[in-house]
Image (tube, rainbow, N blue to C red):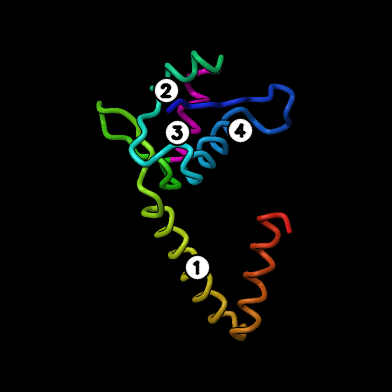
């Protein structure tokens, strides 16, 4: 199992975001299995020709999303599918539902707004 990252230096998307998106997709698709040990921040930065802070920023974002987990000196690993990411999504959905109810939206209106937001976020 090898990690494959292809960054586009001409892209309008920041390198850390390209890295974050590719790692996230590979983890969620199973291309990187649960428990896969990721390279160190410095190692991956050197391999990709990036600053260590760029890789660290991507790792922090992935950890906040529940995609990866850091186990101290043992390294950084692909986290179990779901877990933290599913909990965060469920919490966000609950917060939205409560806010929509407080604003006086009907159930249908609240669902319609949520569907519009999801369509916008996923491009269609």
C-alpha separation, residue under disc 3 versus residue under disc 2: 8 Å
Which residue is the extreme one toward the front?
Answer: 1
Q: Residue at x 59, y 80 (%)?
A: 103
The span picked out in magenta is: 51-62
* Secondary structure category for the residue under label 2: helix
According to the image, label 2 marks what residue? 41
C-alpha separation, residue under disc 1 versus residue under disc 4: 26 Å
Which residue is the extreme one toward the left?
Answer: 73
Find residue 84 and report its horizontal and vertical position in percent. Answer: 38, 53
Question: Which part of the image, by quadrant, shows the C terminus?
Answer: bottom right
Find residue 14 and report its horizontal and vertical position in percent. Answer: 64, 30
Find residue 109 and report its horizontal and vertical position in percent. Answer: 65, 81
Label 3 packing within 10 angstroms: few (<14), some (14-19), many (20+): many
Labels 2 and 1 touching (C-beta < 8 A): no
Question: Which part of the image, by quadrant, shows the N terminus?
Answer: top left
According to the image, label 4 marks what residue? 18
According to the image, label 3 marks what residue? 59
Is 15 rendered above or below residue 109?
Answer: above
Q: Earlier in the sequence, mark 2 or mark 1?
A: 2
According to the image, label 1 marks what residue? 93
Q: Residue at x 46, y 20 (%)?
A: 44
Q: Earlier in the sequence, mark 1 or mark 4?
A: 4
Q: Of helix, strand and loop, which mostly describes the magenta segment? A: helix
Label 1 packing within 10 angstroms: few (<14), some (14-19), many (20+): few
Labels 3 and 2 touching (C-beta < 8 A): yes
Q: Residue at x 46, y 40 (%)?
A: 62
């Amino acid at each position: 199992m090898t990690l494959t990252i292809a960054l586009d230096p001409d892209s309008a998307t920041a390198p850390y975001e390209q890295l974050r998106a590719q790692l996230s997709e590979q983890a969620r698709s199973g291309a990187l299995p649960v428990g896969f040990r990721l390279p160190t921040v410095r190692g991956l930065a050197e391999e990709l020709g990036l600053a260590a802070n760029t890789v660290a920023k991507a790792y922090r974002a992935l950890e906040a999303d529940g995609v990866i987990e850091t186990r101290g000196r043992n390294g950084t690993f692909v986290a179990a599918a779901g877990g933290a990411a599913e909990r965060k999504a469920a919490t966000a959905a609950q917060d939205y539902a409560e806010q929509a109810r407080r604003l006086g939206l009907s159930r249908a209106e609240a669902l319609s707004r949520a569907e519009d937001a999801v369509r916008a976020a996923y491009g269609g």
